Amino acid sequence: MSSSIYINSKNVFLDTVNSKDYIQLDRVSTIYQALKDSIKKPLKMILLYGKPGTGKSMFLTKLYHDLSSSQIVHIYQTPILDESEFYKILAQDIFSTKYSGELNFTQFMKIVANSDISSIPVVLLDEAQLYSDALMEKIRLISDTRTIKFVITLHKTEKEDLIAKEHFQTRIWETIELENASNAELKIYIQKKLMKANCFDSANMFTTKSVNKIFKLTNGNYRDTNKLLYALFDIYSAYDTNHQLSSVGTTHVSNKLIEMSAIHTGLINA
Ligand SMILES: Nc1ncnc2c1ncn2[C@@H]1O[C@H](COP(=O)(O)OP(=O)(O)OP(=O)(O)O)[C@@H](O)[C@H]1O
Ligand SMILES: [Mg+2]
């Protein structure tokens, strides 16, 4: 193997969100299709939720990328916490209306009422757990006008927790949960990710046994898996630099190295 392979493999597992890095997994594809179908339904707001690192931002970015070829879609990866700022940005992005001063809800609703856009734009809001309850309620009211369609993601672990919140009680919410990968999905995820970056030899190093070990440590969480594998390939490249690869072996990933990486990333305590 050329010496850059471990560096390249390591970089595959950087914690970045980019639609071109999206890996198609069967279960996620099913959810994705369901989501695309519900976007077409009027009067539905879509709530995408799940634990941190389950791929919500990735999913939303992919959705943005796919929808943008056929319809008007806007994505806000960082929440716009100030209400006036929120309306101003939407007014500008959707209705091309520029405001220099403050813009309140009533004024924004007037813009919405007077709009003459022919198709309903889709607005994707990531990290919505950061929006205030007051703003969430306004978003719901905007959605009620059927002029803008919202898809919202938030990291919340318990569905019960969410439903308890007043604004999620109405039937207009379609809720979709993203979960950690299963053992089998994790293997596909790791191998596809590496193959996409032409790191075929590295992809082949992940046997069922090594994936089982990784799964035990990360519980199939994508972010934790990224961290673990980033550390793993960091260790490999260090051995490579020191010409000591033969001491760890390169045909498959040993459980010992996986454990070492888990200690490095804090997934297990030394
Ligand atoms: N389908 C996928 N294809 C490729 N990479 C993915 C996929 N899903 C998740 N990932 C990877 O996992 C990492 C974590 O995913 P993401 O940031 O989307 O999680 P999240 O659910 O938005 O977490 P948080 O709640 O903390 O915002 C991403 O940086 C990405 O590298
Ligand atoms: Mg996220």
Image (spheres, rainbow, N blue to C red):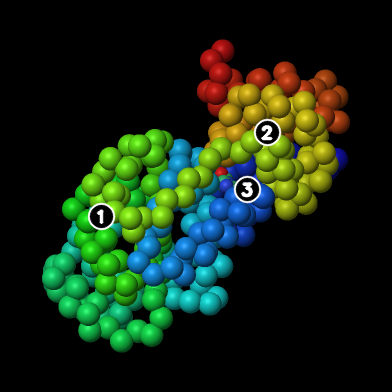
Q: Position of residue 155 (x, y in %)?
A: 40, 42
| Residue 236 in view of the camera | yes
**Quadrant of the rendered image containing residue 106:** bottom left
Q: Residues within 10 Å of mark 3 (few under 14, many from 20)?
A: few
| Residue 61 in view of the camera | no
Q: Position of residue 147 (x, y in %)?
A: 32, 75
Q: Position of residue 241 (x, y in %)?
A: 75, 32
Which residue is nearer to you in this view: 66 or 29?
29
Q: Position of residue 142 (x, y in %)?
A: 26, 67
Q: Residue at x 61, y 24 (%)?
A: 217
Q: Which residue is mark 3?
A: 27
Query: Label 1, label 2: how many angstroms apart (C-alpha)?
Result: 36 Å
Q: Residues within 10 Å of mark 2 (few under 14, many from 20)?
A: some
Q: Amino acid at mark 1?
A: Met
Quadrant containing the C terminus is top right
Q: Residues within 10 Å of mark 1 (few under 14, many from 20)?
A: some
Q: Secondary structure at mark 3?
A: helix
Q: Secondary structure at mark 2?
A: helix
Q: Amino acid at mark 3?
A: Arg
Q: Amino acid at mark 2?
A: Asn
- Return the residue found at the far front: 171
- Some atom of ligand 1 lies within 8 Å of the CB belonging to the residue at label 1: no
Quadrant containing the N terminus is top right
Q: Which residue is mark 2?
A: 183
Q: Residue at x 53, y 40 (%)?
A: 179
116 lies left or right of 57: left
Dot placed on the residue nearer the N-terminal end, 3 or 2 = 3
